[in-house]
Each structure stands twice: as structure tokens, then as C-alpha cells.
Amino acid sequence: MGRVVVGVHGTEASRRALQRAATIARERGWGLEVVTAWPEADEALIHDVPGHYNAARGRAMRWQADAVAALDPSLLPRLSTYLVNARPAEALVARSADADLLVVGTAASTDAPDLPGVSGTCCREARCPTDVVADPRASRRRDRGKAPRARSRQAPNRVTHDAP
């Protein structure tokens, strides 16, 4: 059975990525792995201390729980969740090691040759094809009918989609 990994962190872009990943998992009969890393990419890396509350971990747990609650219940038997204390890109690249597809969202325009941030790092370093789902508000493309396309010499397996 195949496996699709998706990064979720509470933004509209990650919700759209989860929708795309869930659709792929359902259509192909694959497992769905939801990964939420904390702290966020722009926060200081703070490791979890057992027995102490950590606000970053609490936010990540809430984001992941909300995301999973929104999924089609038919996916639950094939669903795995991971709450990881690591940089988001590092966590996603590590989970992609034996995955068939990694799906990430981006608030950036996918028209740029190289994406910034977590999505860009995943495109360059993931060990499987990476599907980048763009938030349509960020896309500069006017032609929504364009087919998804492979992009970037640095990330030849990158495919981008404008989310509906």
C-alpha cells in the first residue's frame, strides 16, 4: 500500500494541502500520514520537557486535532498522525524517506522558480515526489485551467497545484 505524507500547521495553505493529500489517499487506497511539527519554522527550537506545558506543542496538538476532525471518516483506518518536536522542513523530509508522495501547502506564489521556506526546502530535499498546493490568493497565474506542471531544476519532482 502506498503512503502520502502531508504537513499540517494551522494555516489555510496547510488545510488545502491536507484536502489534496486526503483526496489522493482516498482515490489510490493509500495510507495518509499527517505530520505537525513544533515549534513553527520562525520560532526558537524549544525541546519538550516531560511534565511541563509547552505552548508551541499545545498549538501544534490543536492544529492537528482540528485537521484530523475535518477528514472524511473513511480515511481513519489508514490514518497515522505524528506530532514532532523538530523544524517543520526537517520533520517532513524525514517522514518522506519511504513515502510515495509528500504534500505541502504554501502561501507563496508557485510561479516563482524556487519556493521559499518549508515548501522550498521540502521540494529540494524530500526523498519522494513533492506536491505543492498553492493558496489561490497568493497565485499570480490568471489561467486557472493550466495543468499541474513539474518545476525547478533543483526539485525535478515538484508538482504545483492551485487549490480550488
Image (spheres, rainbow, N blue to C red):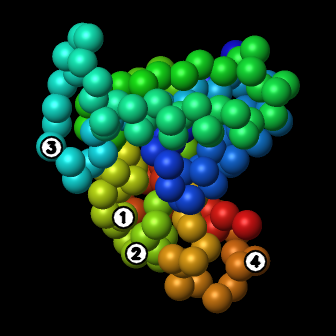
Which of the 4 quarters of the picture holds residue 80? top right
The residue under label 2 is 112
Comparing 97 with 71, the one in front is 71
Which of the 4 quarters of the picture holds residue 38? top left
Q: Gap between marks 4 and 3, in whole Å?
A: 40 Å
Q: Looking at the picture, which amino acid does disc 2 mark?
A: Ala
Question: Which residue is painted at 60% across and 51% down in the image?
Answer: 15
Residue 148 at what x, y percent from top left? 65, 64
Q: Gap between marks 2 and 1, in whole Å?
A: 6 Å
Query: Does the residue at mark 2 contact the one at mark 1 (Cβ under 8 Å)?
Result: yes
Q: Secondary structure under badge 1?
A: loop
Q: Secondary structure under badge 3?
A: loop
Q: Nearer the viewer, mark 4 or mark 3?
A: 3
* Residue 71 can be seen in this image: yes
Q: Does label 4 or label 1 sit earlier along the sequence?
A: 1
Comparing 47 with 127, the one in front is 47
Question: Which residue is painted at 43% across and 70% down in the image?
Answer: 108
Q: Gap between marks 3 and 1, in whole Å?
A: 22 Å
Q: Does label 2 or label 3 sit earlier along the sequence?
A: 3
Residue 137 at what x, y percent from top left? 57, 77
The residue under label 3 is 44
Q: Gap between marks 4 and 1, in whole Å?
A: 21 Å
The residue under label 4 is 145
Q: Quadrant of the N terminus?
A: top right
| Vertical placement of residue 133 versus 22, above or below | below
Residue 45 at what x, y percent from top left? 16, 36
The residue under label 1 is 115
Q: Does label 2 or label 4 sit earlier along the sequence?
A: 2
Dot 2, crowdedness within 10 Å: few (<14), some or many (≥20)? few
Q: Looking at the picture, which amino acid does disc 1 mark?
A: Leu
Query: Does the residue at mark 2 contact the one at mark 3 (Cβ under 8 Å)?
Result: no
